[in-house]
Image (tube, rainbow, N blue to C red):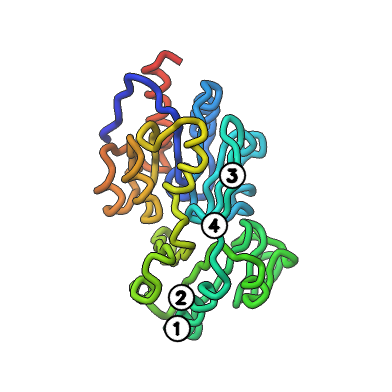
Amino acid sequence: MKLPEFDSPPKAIAIDLDGTLLDSQGRLSERNDKAIEKCIAQGIPVVIATSRPARIVNRIFPQDLAARCSFVIMSGAIAKGNPPLSGYFKESLPEGLARRIIDLALKFDPGIRITVELDGYEFGANWTADAATLWQKNSATPDMVFSVEDALLRQPCKVALSSLGTDVLKLGDEFVKSFGGAISVVPALLGFTMLNITSGQASKPSALRRLLTPRGISLQDMIAFGDDIPDVEMLKECGVSVAVANAFPEVRSVCAYHTASNDEDGVAIVLEQMLARIGK
């Protein structure tokens, strides 16, 4: 491990969820929970920055802790501040652009799995699942699911694509060629490969700025933790970047510091050292 040394506490903390804060079973450990609680008690804003939608975050996080953290969800498409931060921001995908994205995806692979996220709770899908599977895999109930067509009419903010039969990373290259900066294409490699497609204005760093700038906090004043490709841009732009030991090589290479794995409470190790160093 190579842990950061602190002369003063960071002005904010950004933490990825899956593979970083949560263990391999998708659980928040007591040690990580307590470390975050102590940071919040010192007035340090904690932002959970994830590609996941709100419905899954809410299922995982203790309700009392969630009320005191802020959230950047769906790769920066939505940001929600809780005290001491504030505000709610959403970057939608224009309907026409979202349709073109889906058309290109279906030409690439007619069997591709499409999920069109709306607000972090409701979504459209071209796949079906029984109620039990829908809850287990997506933290959703049947009334939260629309057809893709209906979802496109409701100001979507993210299209997620996955496939068992083709390499969706190649599709990502096609999107970049076709749409350029109009969209942001971020692959996620943890578990199975998925493409997260949002507006080109949406990213974890831009969402963090929208939450933090009104408080006079810059990304250079904060510490960020991550493990997967969607975290790279955030880690590059934050002042102190920390990769957990299980991070992909692409993530480790952009981080100045490295901590223990998500199964060894790597986030808590850094936060505890920071709190001890500043005498809290």
- Is residue 22 something one can see in this rendering? no
Mark 2 vs mark 1: which is more N-terminal? 1
Category of crowding for the residue at label 4, using alpha-carbon neighbours closer than 10 angstroms: few (below 14), some (14–19), many (at least 20): many
Q: Amino acid at mark 2?
A: Ser
Q: Is residue 246 above or below residue 167?
A: above
Mark 1 vs mark 3: which is more N-terminal? 3
Q: On the image, which quarter does residue 1 sit in? A: top left
Residue 66 falls left or right of residue 18: right
Disc number lying in front (1 or 3): 3
Mark 3 vs mark 2: which is more N-terminal? 3
Mark 4 vs mark 1: which is more N-terminal? 4
Category of crowding for the residue at label 1, using alpha-carbon neighbours closer than 10 angstroms: few (below 14), some (14–19), many (at least 20): some
Quote the CA–CA distance across marks 1 and 3.
Answer: 35 Å
Residue at 34%, 43% in the rendered image: 237
Q: Mark 2 and 1 residues: CB-CB less than 8 Å, in contact?
A: yes
User: Which element is circle 3 on?
Assistant: strand
- Measuring from the top left, give residue 34's x and y in whole percent: 53, 28
Disc sitting over residue 163 in the figure: 2
> What residue sits right under mark 4 in the picture?
91
Disc sitting over residue 130 in the figure: none
> What residue sits right under mark 3 in the picture?
80
Q: Amino acid at mark 1?
A: Asp
Residue 83 falls left or right of residue 259: right
Category of crowding for the residue at label 3, using alpha-carbon neighbours closer than 10 angstroms: few (below 14), some (14–19), many (at least 20): many
Disc sitting over residue 109 in the figure: 1
Q: Amino acid at mark 4?
A: Glu
Mark 4 vs mark 3: which is more N-terminal? 3
